Amino acid sequence: NNIITMGAEEAAAAAAAEASKKEKKKPTNIVIPPKKPKLSKAERRALQEAQRAAKAEGGGSKPKPKKGGGDNNGAASSNKASGADDKRSTAEGAVDGESQENNSGSSATDNKKDDKTVSLFSHLPQPKHPTDQHLSSISSTIDNNLHPAVPTLGHLYQTHSLLGGNARCRAMLQTFALLLQSYTPPPDTRDFRVDVDHSLLKPAFQYWTTQCRPHSVSMGNAFSFLKLAVANLERDLEWKEAREILLESLEAYVTERIQYAGKAISRHAGSKIQDKGDVILVFGRSEVINRLLLDAALTDGKTFRVIVVDSRPLLEGRDTLEILSRAGIQCTYVLLNALSYLMMREVTKVFLGASALMSNGSVLSRVGTACVALLANSNHIPVLVGCETYKICNRVQLESITGNELGDAEEVAFTDCARVGPSNRWGEEKKKDGSVLSDWKSQPNLKLLNLMYDLTPSSAVTGIVTEVGILPPSSVAVLLREMNPDSAFKGTD
């Protein structure tokens, strides 16, 4: 009985709760929109056709529906009309946005068409284009504290009037010596070493690298040596005494690492040249290779013939041809496309120069060197690379894409091979009207590439001639560790 009584009470409570819910009045602050009139299928179709016609004409509002009446129907129709206007304005905004996107897309397409950079090498710094007013325009924008010798040397770098790793490094060190001679630290400086580093050395080196041309490995190593020499000075030294120490260090670096190293390389490589009958092939221009050939012919009295292989656009082999022919050495001058014929017939040895020597034994040199070395290796002809130890880099490089330098594409477009100096390398003279590449920039599907260097794999090199001796490419890492035990394999410059 108790259970039945409890169940009846619960049912009565639930019924009372439902009755109280039904008795609750609707809140007065809520506005309930009127119900939309229900249209038939034919009316909906007619309304859609009317909307399409109004949209095609570019104006008008939604027609009022036939069914329905009263104020509620009028309000509903006005709401629909305003909704149509909003939709039409949204559609017009979308059309305007699409037109803007199309315009931006067309401008991007035009910029893409105007871009003549090869995408595979787009990560490399673009070459700077010198003009006749180069020195005046640059000197007006640089810091007034920058010595005039800095932009002067930068102009030589930029116009390729100064080529070769040794020549560029020697000129840089001579300019630094001139800067040190004319520099005096401020009287209120606490440490002249910091002032020399931040106010004298770094601005000049950054100017050459960023405004003129990327620095070579030889320049980077020499600059690191100079910074280390400044850091090792005693803080209590007088500036005159410190300056003398730095000037002596610069002179010793040039004498020992460049001049004496060239003599040692000439002696080691000259021993591989026979007294008579050798036919030696060289590529382009290398200061150390020219020196060893001159020493072998003039000092040792050996008789041999030299084949000078050259390539556009720099044509550096002409300088080699002039130097050797004036010394009385029998020479033959050919371009790179005739290399395969000569290599198989008469060449006995190949001597090549180097811009840098990687720690894995690969050689970075003027573009075209890899072709010569690979072809000689396929014909079982020994390839000797002359390279000073100050050009050794602790980087490892496997190809010529990630680390390289771009030259001016106008040098490739200019097909006149009769030029003899750097002054006409930038298209300053009038081009021939019939030149095929005179209007190459207006051709939408034509891009020109002018790489400065290529990488020769260590497998194509027989031996590397340094001032230490003739070493296999696999011993470069050992030589780097022995010469620089503190900095070997700790990163790149």
Image (tube, helix red, strand yellow):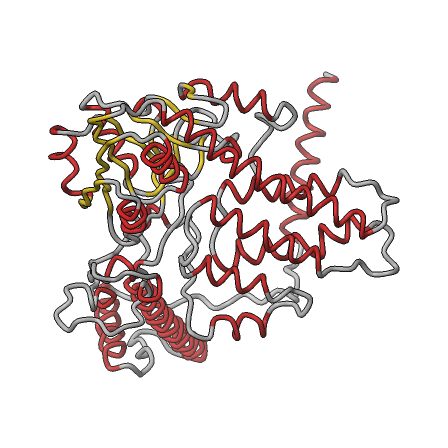
Residue 159 higher or lower than 333, as above or below = below
Where does the image place residue 367, in percent across and percent down from the top left? Answer: 31, 43
Answer left or right for 474 relative to 209: left
Question: For the point 60% across and 44% down, which residue is it?
Answer: 223
Question: For the point 36% across and 68% down, which residue is it?
Answer: 104
Answer left or right for 319 relative to 1: left
Where does the image place residue 286, in percent across and percent down from the top left? Answer: 37, 42
Question: For the point 87% across and 60% down, which residue is it?
Answer: 187
Question: For the point 45% across and 77% down, which residue is it?
Answer: 75
Residue 89 quadrant: bottom left
Answer left or right for 483 relative to 331: right
Screen quadrant of the C terminus: top right
Which of these two is toward me, 45 or 443?
443
Residue 416 quadrant: bottom left
Residue 219 higher or lower than 296, as above or below = below
Answer left or right for 172 relative to 407: right
Residue 356 higher or lower than 113, as above or below = above
Which of these two is toward me, 316 or 485?
316
Which of these two is toward me, 228 or 257?
257
Screen quadrant of the N terminus: top right
